[in-house]
Amino acid sequence: MSNETMTAGEKNKVLDIEKIRNDFPILNRLVKGHPLVYFDNAATSQKPAAVIDALVHYYTHLNANVHRGIHTLAEEATAAFEATRDAIRGFINAAYREEIIYTKGTTEGINLVAYTWGRQQLQEGDEVIISGMEHHSNIVPWQIVCEEKKARLTVIPVTDKGELDMEAFYTLLSEKTKLVAVVHVSNALGTINPVKTIIDAAHGKGALVLVDGAQSSMHLDIDVQALDCDFFALSAHKMLGPTGAGALYGKKQILEAMPVFNGGGEMIKEVTFEKTTYNELPYKFEAGTPNIADFVAFRPAIEYINELGKENIRKHEDALLSYATEKVREIEGIKIIGEAAHKASVLSFVIDGVHPQDIGILLDNKGIAVRTGHHCAEPLMNRFCIPGTIRASFAVYNTLEEVDKLAEGLKKAIKVLK
Amino acid sequence: MTNSKSIPEIEQEIVEDFSLFDSWDDKYEYIIDLGKKLPPLDDAFKKEENKVKGCQSTVWLVADYIGGKVIYKAESDAIIVKGLISMLIRVLSHHTPDEILDADMDFINKIGMTSHLAQTRSNGLRAMVKQMKHYALAFKGSKFNA
Ligand SMILES: Cc1ncc(COP(=O)(O)O)c(C=O)c1O
């Protein structure tokens, strides 16, 4: 474990959840006359006051364009903007700050790799392996680039329990494999995938690995050097930060060899009509005026997580997940989708003879926010022969009492619907 | 069967029915009950071309044109949506294309449905009304069966 993670948070601290809840202003609001129970954290997390305040502070005191001016505001804005890059580097334990490319989020990070590395490296007959539990954002970019390059896209099957079929993966993996792009934690099932094993096996065949960390960043300790992944994509909004900000980690020598993504200001060194030379990492991938305020406000989110300590967060979330699993299992007619041995913070289920949407509406009527539908993972829903699930996903500010409300709400809803 | 009441009269009836409920729990129970009572649609009609786009759940909608009146039949795999459809059918079915095209369907706002349903779901409701009006418009142009 790195020094950063050792110092981050106090080990084995019992979190004061009431105190944490007070840091999230939105948790005070009522929905349909009931206190909000927010169980849609896998879609996006709520934001602590520190993040909201940072946004207001930025526009009130710092606003200027970054990397360009010599005036005080420009320098202060640049410093705040760049400080987040260091925070992200530490958060995932990347070796160099220039390995952190700012993006709009996970989706853009994956597209960046597909459109630059993918277009340059993939050739006819090459193979890209994804898994059967990918979010659409880790399917569609690969479909596009594979079609363009006449490369083959293959899919690691998912077992009945909602785990990756690793035997099948080893069969798919070959010298033809150029990239494995796989989700770290499934947003629809909660499954924690054995990415380290996948990375080692892929490297054995000379393939690179991209890890979709949209869901894992908030819940697991991330150490990209220990994992040895080649790319790692995350979204700030799923980890207490603002929307429209995210990061793509890539190994330095790979990023350096990659062609540029968007062209424009910021990403250039010199422009003449004859030839343009490009800026260095990470700026060569960051064309145009970035989403400055949201990146500035992303840092307090990371600091907030570090302060609590990932292990402590994880322990509380695990307690919520196992309590919720137990409570939901008691209800007749409910079938849990995704019963992997290792899960993080997501409980997905279906109910005999009841459409998920009806449950979603009736729970909303009690102020309980869950997600219903296919969770942007239609192939996975087809795998389980269901149109969608009801998904409750937990965060550090949720409580066991809220889980009780969910169980009560479900029982009542089922009673009126049946 | 003909409908002796005008569309605005039926809308008013529904608004009055809803005013009797104290809580959204009761309103939903009523809507769910309507959903359960909606006659099932023949499986033969459950085809791709009869699906209403823009709904999270699957909604099938078909229409007949008999004696100058449009008659709707619909079903969904979700019960609350079925209840909502049942109300739309009660309002619009058995009226002439012109009456249907003129309907403002303001009862949906008046019973608080648009503000209560999440945006995506009230989009679905709008999509259903739009599709019903589409049928009316198509029948208006045809002399068939009129
Ligand atoms: C597993 C997974 N991958 C990718 C994404 C896409 O993230 P974003 O929409 O922030 O780009 C999500 C978000 O739902 C996700 O859950």
Image (spheres, rainbow, N blue to C red):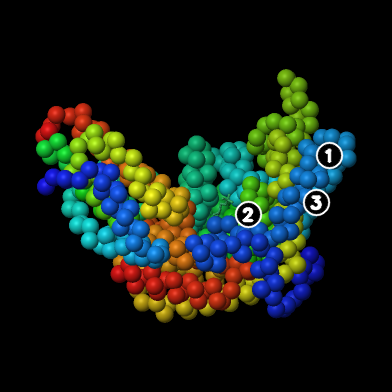
Q: Label 1 vs label 3: CA separation?
A: 14 Å
- Which secondary structure, mark 3? helix
Confirm or reject: label 1 Cβ below 8 Å from ligand 1.
no
Of A207 and A112, nearer the camera is A112
Split into 4 quadrants, where in the image is the N terminus of chain A? bottom right
Confirm or reject: label 2 Cβ below 8 Å from ligand 1.
yes
Foreground label between 3 and 2: 2
Going from N to C along the chain, the mark reached first, 2 or 1, is 1
Task: Kindly indicate whether the residues beneath marks 3 and 2 are on one polypeptide chain.
Answer: yes
Amino acid under disc 1: Ala
Q: Within 10 angstroms of label 3, few (less than 14), some, or many (20 or more) residues?
A: some
Q: Residue at x 48, y 79 (%)?
A: A326
Q: Chain of mark 1?
A: A
Left or right: A167 in relation to B55: right
Left or right: A106 in relation to A409: right
Residue A77 figure quarter? top right
Q: Residue at x 30, y 39 (%)?
A: B103
Of A111 and A177, nearer the camera is A111
Of B144 and A381, nearer the camera is B144
Seen in the picture, residue A373 relative to A253 is either above or below; the reply is below
Amino acid under disc 3: Ala
Seen in the picture, residue B138 relative to A326 is either above or below; the reply is above
Task: Kindly indicate whether the residues beneath marks 2 and 1 are on one polypeptide chain.
Answer: yes
Foreground label between 1 and 3: 1
Q: Which residue is mark 2?
A: A237
Q: Chain of mark 3?
A: A
Going from N to C along the chain, the mark reached first, 1 or 3, is 1
Residue A260 visible from this viewpoint: yes
Q: Which residue is mark 3?
A: A83
Q: Which mark is residue A393?
A: none
Q: Which residue is mark 1?
A: A74
Split into 4 quadrants, where in the image is the C terminus of chain A? bottom left
